[in-house]
Amino acid sequence: MLTPRFELSQDDDFIILVIHAPYAKVAETEFHIQDEIVCFYSKPYYLRLHLPNRVLDEDDRNEATYDVDKGTFTAKIGKENKGEEFEGLDMLTKLLTPPDGGEKPKLFSPGLVEEIGSSDLDQSAVSPEQAGNSSEGVKTGYEDDEDDFDWYIEQSVPSEVEGLSGGAKYGFALTKSGMSEKLLEEFSEVLSIRDPDNMSSAEKRQQRLAQEADNFCEEHYLADLYDNDEMSEILKFEPWWSKACADCKLSEEEKDKLLKLPKKKHLIDADVLPTVYLGLVDIVFAYAYNHRVLYGESNTESGWTIAKLAATLSWFESFTSLQDVVVSCVRRALAYPLHRNWQLCEKVLEDVQTLFAGGKKPLLKCLLDVHAALIVSDPHYIFNDLYITDYCVWIQSAKSKKIQSLADALKATVVAKSDVGFELEELENAAALVVKEQESCVGEITSKLGQMGVRKSALDSDDDSNEDDEDSEEDSDEDSSESDTDSDESEQSDETHPQNNGLPENEGVTENRQNPKPDSANSEIA
């Protein structure tokens, strides 16, 4: 049988169920409603939903219609209590998973229980040692809204979970062990830790901190601090959760993924449960960092970036306090990726707080994106099997109150540069002195060049003045010479041409030219 794609919505009186079943035989369609359970059958489709509250099986207002063009059934189912709010109608995997069929078991082995029906917990899951003990004072592993966590208190991973006899535990809720031998080749390519089955949490953490310190590059950090033109654009980018985070919608592709997730019921030991929430903070930080620096896109390196930044994945780290996980996120963001900037880390931490404040739906979207990024990044897909798939299932049933309390704790958490351990303040102060000295040297050189320019201008001005004086003297000499020449010529003219009885010179000359003959006659008489 096929599980059809479906979606749920509500108003004050009804639950509206829309089922996409284009190949259904409408004449053989059946709906069955009982308490919180709604069943749909129309060959080859079968759907059974477990609603969070009760609905009415016999109500004249209930109705179902079929749209031939769209191939969809739409059923309106009356609420038993009008005006009651049904939470989690977007958590499709949870709606498909049967609830517990009786009272909550008081004893169990931590792990994952895959339920086929709504039967009680299989008694074979309880160990003989547990069966022989009294149930008094034993935590069931179920989340109790009144039993809130103190995210700031350092907690320890129980020794029995460390697996002293069966090897170290890792994976979602510390339920995996002995896998490094089976997947040795894949582990060696994606894990920073070697031989995880034989290392305690303390040993892993010690090696992780040492490797992060070795990988931190002062030159890279300072280069991103002083010379990164792209950083301002990265910090200004607005991701999808920046507006109406709690009201985000799941795409059709994301809904299809939810239908394909395993229908598991997670029973997590109360001592391990905080590490599950803190591991989620670690993974969401890695996702938010990758999403921001790629401006909302994803590429072939996204799987590597997410796995590398999240020590939960690459080191099988089990965090015991919120401060530890936040410091780890910042340290790794300053030691491994392309952009290593303190302001960027602060911005991503704000993104993480916003996502947790939005509740389960935005966190589910993040996990689905992480799942998709790891699938296409071979061999990082192994982290889906170890962590992300189970996180996608579990988050749909996680307690909203605990998620909100974690969001509040994230908002109150402050990480100083001194907490990171890379001596960032000393490094920045030293770099600032060097920059100041360089600026001072540049200022002196600029000043000297300016003075040299002034002197050169003065010299050029003097040269121009001298040239002007010389030109003036030459012009004066030339004028004087021309004046003397004119004077001499005038004197010679006076000697050559006597006065013409007060007549202009030209007129006298003309007159003489007009009377040549009398002069000639006088000459002959003489």
Image (tube, rainbow, N blue to C red):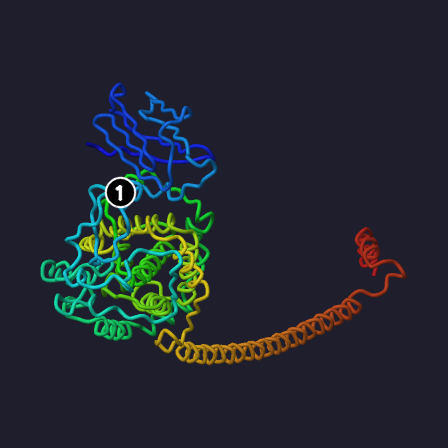
Location of the C terminus (image quadrant): bottom right
Q: Quadrant of residue 330?
A: bottom left
Find the residue positioned furthest to the right: 502
Q: Quadrant of residue 268?
A: bottom left
Element at label 1: loop
Position of residue 59 in the picture relative to residue 174 (left or right): right
For label 1, the crowd category at 10 Å Cα-Cα, with few meaning under 14, some 14 to 19 and many 20 or more, is many
* Residue 399 rendering spot, x and y as whole percentages: 37, 53
Foreground of the two, 409 or 400: 400
* Amino acid carrying mark 1 in the image: Pro
* Residue 428 rendering spot, x and y as whole percentages: 42, 76
Number of numbered discs on residues = 1
Position of residue 397 in the picture relative to residue 190 (left or right): right
Location of the N terminus (image quadrant): top left
Which residue is painted at 86% across and 64% down in the image?
Answer: 499
- Vertical side of 178 occupied by 444: above or below: below
The residue singled out by tag 1 in the image is 98
Q: Quadrant of residue 309?
A: bottom left
- Vertical side of 234 occupied by 482: above or below: below
Position of residue 119 in the picture relative to residue 53 (left or right): left
* Residue 453 rendering spot, x and y as whole percentages: 55, 76
* Residue 484 rendering spot, x and y as whole percentages: 73, 73
Foreground of the two, 133 or 64: 133
Find the residue positioned furthest to the top: 27
